[in-house]
């Protein structure tokens, strides 16, 4: 019996090895046969992107914009160098410079996520230097704010208002709103600092109201912290910032000036050109920290574009930096994360959009936090082509039904029609990763990571290499085919994916002729319920690494049969699986925009529909 089992096992391994050898040979054969087609598609893609960039450059030229072309490293470096060499000066001259830096940083961020999504060696290199420049811009903005803040504090008595007995300045600059209160009166009645124009109020405990200090508030429209942490820190993050970040700094004051014979004398210290941050709780005279201290009460208004999760308790956190050397030219990387300890009594008023909380955390970034997995798992989704170079993607998440319109020009958001997404609904088409990043800023995160599966029940992410292969293979088919998920996909594990697809009738797309009453009724129904077009009998496709096969399994079956459908064998790509039985596929693909196909590929890569869909 033992010998029989060993013989059977050896035969099984030999059969598997023969099958793998056959598949490898077929893969090489089909890859070689399609080499010309792939080269042609790659060439067409580069041509379409070049033309699109020329059109954008021309529009930028006509608009007479001051910012450099963020795709050109030399031009951006020259601009940033000139910008950095400009003295900070006073707050009134520094804040416009900070606004320029924030606008450039945002443009670099949006272009860098698109470059990363393209995935070519040249665009990955572009993404790297763009991210480094963003970090340099953020650091320089902080330096300019510190220098101008020190200049103001040094002459704070000149701005003292004797009527209000306070020294307070607010500058609501675009992208980087600023407020500074200097405690010159040391008046314990001054408990609440209202930074008018910022919609921010900071209530001080008595210890700070009596202390020789300044309170600085900087409100950034964007998250200027977590996107620039290390790749490992970003991958492990389960919380994301909403509504930008609020930085509250507690600053020390220089020695007071003296008037001598008409001259104003100021001591030259480290506070003459920079700020010195003071920790809280304030240490006692013997240097010890108090065991308990009253918190600061912070209140601010959230932007109109922030979508609060219904039924969720608002959560506020602070950034706990963990800067580590990388060992290369003294470079460092932040392994930090968002923390919530030391923050209490968080309240939110939906009518006024006012967020309030108590905190002991100063000299750091504070923000409203939201779990990154709220939209997961996806309930269902459908890609529906409108023609060779356009289509619609419908995604039903745990909270919303989203509708994306896709074309060679980019992706547009059509739903949900909410006040918080109105600015996106009215925007021109944009690259898929850019639109998804802007949706995330609203509170709708559709760019899941493996870590987002941890709080989900029975959700196993696919391997990234497999998902990238699927996206690359399928984007060429979606000029002609419906595409949706299979209920068996999750149960296939991380190394396999199951999907369903079917040719969309011509009457739904471009090139339809004549009038078909049934087709018109179906098209009208598709607008109100696009998922009604899905048929349980649609053929299923099983995808593994370098192996794609049409299988017997169907969503109306009780078990998942991975055996080949009649007349089908495993191929290297989905295209090879279908072209033999679909003579119209190659002509349709030839007339399809390659840039449109690449937009579809980037969208599928970002959404990770095959990893995070779990039908109800």
Image: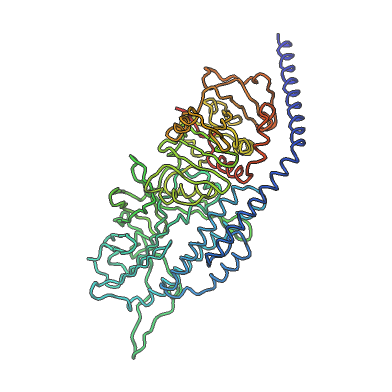
In the image, 169 versus 326, the foreground residue is 169
Counting from the top left corner in percent of width and height, residue 370 is at 41, 45
| Residue 467 location, quadrant | top right
Would residue 564 be seen by someone viewing this image from the given angle?
yes
On screen, residue 444 versus residue 8, left or right, reads left
Would residue 347 be seen by someone viewing this image from the given angle?
no
On screen, residue 175 versus residue 549, left or right, reads left
Q: Is residue 240 above or below residue 174?
A: above
Counting from the top left corner in percent of width and height, residue 579 is at 68, 30
Q: Furthest residue to the top?
A: 1
On screen, residue 222 versus residue 211, left or right, reads right
On screen, residue 591 versus residue 345, left or right, reads right
Q: Furthest residue to the front?
A: 514
Name the residue at 61% across, 42% down: 597
Q: Is residue 460 above or below residue 340?
A: above
Counting from the top left corner in percent of width and height, residue 542 is at 61, 27
Q: Quadrant of the C terminus?
A: top left
């Amino acid at each position: 019996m033992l010998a029989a089992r060993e013989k059977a096992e050896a035969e099984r391994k030999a059969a598997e090895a023969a099958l793998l050898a056959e598949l490898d040979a077929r893969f090489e054969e089909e890859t070689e046969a399609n080499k010309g087609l792939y080269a042609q598609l790659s060439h067409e893609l580069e041509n379409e992107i070049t033309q699109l960039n020329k059109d954008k450059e021309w529009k930028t030229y006509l608009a007479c914009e001051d910012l450099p072309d963020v795709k050109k490293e030399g031009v951006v470096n020259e601009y940033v160098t000139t910008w950095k060499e400009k003295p900070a000066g006073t707050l009134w001259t520094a804040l416009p410079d900070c606004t320029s830096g924030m606008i450039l940083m945002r443009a670099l961020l949006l272009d860098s996520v698109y470059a990363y999504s393209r995935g070519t060696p040249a665009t990955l290199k572009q993404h790297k230097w763009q991210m480094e420049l963003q970090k340099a811009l953020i650091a320089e903005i902080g330096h300019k704010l510190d220098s101008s803040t020190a200049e103001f504090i040094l002459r704070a008595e000149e701005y003292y208002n004797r009527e209000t007995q306070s020294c307070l300045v607010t500058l609501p600059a675009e992208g980087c709103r600023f407020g500074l209160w200097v405690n010159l009166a040391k008046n314990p009645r001054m408990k609440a600092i209202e930074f008018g124009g910022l919609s921010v109020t900071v209530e001080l405990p008595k210890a700070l109201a009596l202390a020789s200090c300044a309170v600085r508030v900087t409100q950034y429209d964007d998250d200027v912290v977590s996107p620039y942490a290390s790749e490992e820190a970003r991958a492990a993050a389960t919380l994301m910032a909403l509504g930008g970040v609020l930085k509250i700094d507690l600053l020390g004051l220089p020695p007071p000036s003296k008037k001598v014979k008409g001259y104003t004398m100021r001591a030259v210290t480290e506070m003459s050109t920079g700020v010195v941050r003071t920790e809280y709780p304030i240490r006692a005279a013997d240097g010890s920290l108090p065991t308990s201290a009253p918190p600061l009460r912070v209140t601010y208004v959230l932007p109109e574009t922030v979508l609060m999760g219904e039924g969720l308790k608002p959560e506020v956190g602070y950034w706990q930096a963990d800067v580590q050397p990388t060992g290369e030219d003294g470079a460092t990387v932040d392994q930090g994360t968002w923390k919530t300890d030391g923050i209490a009594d968080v309240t939110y008023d939906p009518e006024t959009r006012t967020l309030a909380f108590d905190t002991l955390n100063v000299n750091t970034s504070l923000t409203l936090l939201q779990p990154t997995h709220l939209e997961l798992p996806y309930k269902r989704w459908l890609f529906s082509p409108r023609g060779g170079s356009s289509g619609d993607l419908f995604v039903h998440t745990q909270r919303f039904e989203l509708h994306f319109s896709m074309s060679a020009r980019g992706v547009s958001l059509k739903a949900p029609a909410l006040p918080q997404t109105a600015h996106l609904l009215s925007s021109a088409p944009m690259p898929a990763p850019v639109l998804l990043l802007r949706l995330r800023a609203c509170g709708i995160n559709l760019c899941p990571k493996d870590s987002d599966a941890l709080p989900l029940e029975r959700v196993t992410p696919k391997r990234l290499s497999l998902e990238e292969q699927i996206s690359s293979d399928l984007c060429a088919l979606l000029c002609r085919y419906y595409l949706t998920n299979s209920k068996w996909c999750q149960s296939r594990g991380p190394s396999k994916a199951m999907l369903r697809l079917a040719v969309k009738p011509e009457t739904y797309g471009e090139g339809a002729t004549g009038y078909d009453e049934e087709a018109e009724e179906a098209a009208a129904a598709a607008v109100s319920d696009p998922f009604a077009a899905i048929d349980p009998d649609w053929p299923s496709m099983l995808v593994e690494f370098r192996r794609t096969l049409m299988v017997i399994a169907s969503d109306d079956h009780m078990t998942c049969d991975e055996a080949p459908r009649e007349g089908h064998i495993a191929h290297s790509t989905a295209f090879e699986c279908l072209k033999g039985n679909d003579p119209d596929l190659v002509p349709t693909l030839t007339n399809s925009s390659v840039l449109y196909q690449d937009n579809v590929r980037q969208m599928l890569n970002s959404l990770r529909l095959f990893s995070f869909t779990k039908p109800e």
